Structure formats: structure tokens, C-alpha cells
Image (tube, rainbow, N blue to C red):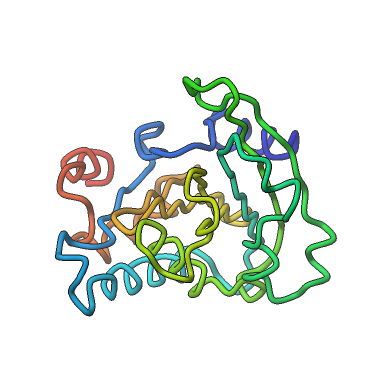
Amino acid sequence: MRTLELYLDKYFHGIELAPALFYETNKAIRFEISESIAFDEPDFLKQAFYRSITLFEAVFGDNDEIMMVTDVHTNNHFLRERPLNVYSKFIKRKELLYTLRFSTIPNPHGHEEEEILTHRFMLTCKKQDIRYKQLLKAICYEDFADPTTILKQNPESGYDIFFINLSKNIIYHLYDDRGCDIIAADRESIRFLYEQYPEWILDYDKQEVDNDFA
């Protein structure tokens, strides 16, 4: 936990690792991952899968060191009885699970319910260690009745998964099927995303992104 805090202090001015990262820095891009179409259409998440995977592969190279941070927000005790399956299911090298670090954060983000805890899991790995395509698809499916959803047995709980590129100091957060925040310590390290995928930038925030990158 302390290692992550020191890293965020050094490269991201002590930013809190929490949703809506886009609004915490001017070195950020918010991408629209799926357009608003009827969820009962056969390919309603096809675009979300394509964009989230394309951006992930653009941000993370094969040799980059990655910290995968999973925050589970809950007042349920299910994590004590059965560990979260994110790592056992989506990490290929099972020996890496012995390096998994865990901590708890009480009442995160000023949550109104004082009993809410954030259970934080952290793992350092490489891109090839993660079944990232399947994991990103599972995140996109989280709001829908699908067997791949990560917390399908505990719908009252919530979670966030952050991928930190420790080699390039970039943070990738696919917050659901609608959008993805990508922030960087150095704006120039993600300028190529702004130039290559301008039509994917969320319209609502495009003017702010243009002001920062143009």
C-alpha cells in the first residue's frame, strides 16, 4: 500500500486512485468506449470490446511492468470467505498470486455508509501474464446479466480495476462499458492516443482535452 502511495506522490502529485481520474489532472484523455445503442442488440458491446482492448494494447507494451490494482467496495464479508476471483481467473502464471498484496481502506472517498470498506488487491506483472482481453470484456459486461461478470454473486458490491504502466507512468481505468480514462505523468507519452483516436474522445469532455493537447 505504501509503495503505491509513494509512486502516486512521485509521478502523479499524490492523486487519489479512484474513479473519474480524468478530472484530477490536465494530462488525461476520456474515451467513449461504446455508443448509446439498445442493449438487446446482438453486437451492442462489440464496439466496447474493440475500443477497450485497442487502447489497452496501445498503452501497454510486452516488456512494460504493470501494477494491477483492484478495489472492491463493500460492506459484505464475502471476501473473507472466498477470495476475489479476478486474479485467480485472469492471471495466467499462478505463481504470481503468491506476490499479491492486500490492504483495506475504511470509508473510501467519503462514502455516506460508514461500514463500507475498500479491499485493495495489488499485483505487479507483465501484459502477457494477464488474460486482459477476457478481463476487459468482463468489466464491460458488469452492468448486464452475463456469466462473465466479476461480482455476479455480490451485486450489492462495487469494484474498480486500475492498470498502472510503471515503465511509462500511465494509468488506464476502464470504468465500465461506457468509458475509459487514461492519464499520464507526462502528457507527451499519451499524445499519440489523442492523435490516433480523436473520434473516440468523449464529446462532453472533448473541448477540455483539445485545450490540453492541441
User: 194 and 122: which one is in front?
Assistant: 122
Q: Is residue 90 above or below residue 182?
A: below
User: 148 and 31: which one is in front?
Assistant: 148
- Quadrant location of the N terminus? top right
- How far from the left and from the top, in percent, is residue 40? 20, 70
Drawn side of residue 117 relative to residue 171, left or right:
right
Total marks drawn?
0
- How far from the left and from the top, in percent, is residue 74? 57, 38
Residue drawn where x is 77% and y is 55% of the image: 100
Q: Is residue 214 above or below residue 110?
A: below
Residue drawn where x is 63% and y is 59% of the image: 66
Q: Is residue 10 above or below residue 88?
A: above
User: 165 and 74: which one is in front?
Assistant: 74
Quarter of the image for residue 21 reads top left
Residue drawn where x is 69% and y is 48% of the image: 79
- How far from the left and from the top, in percent, is residue 86? 62, 61
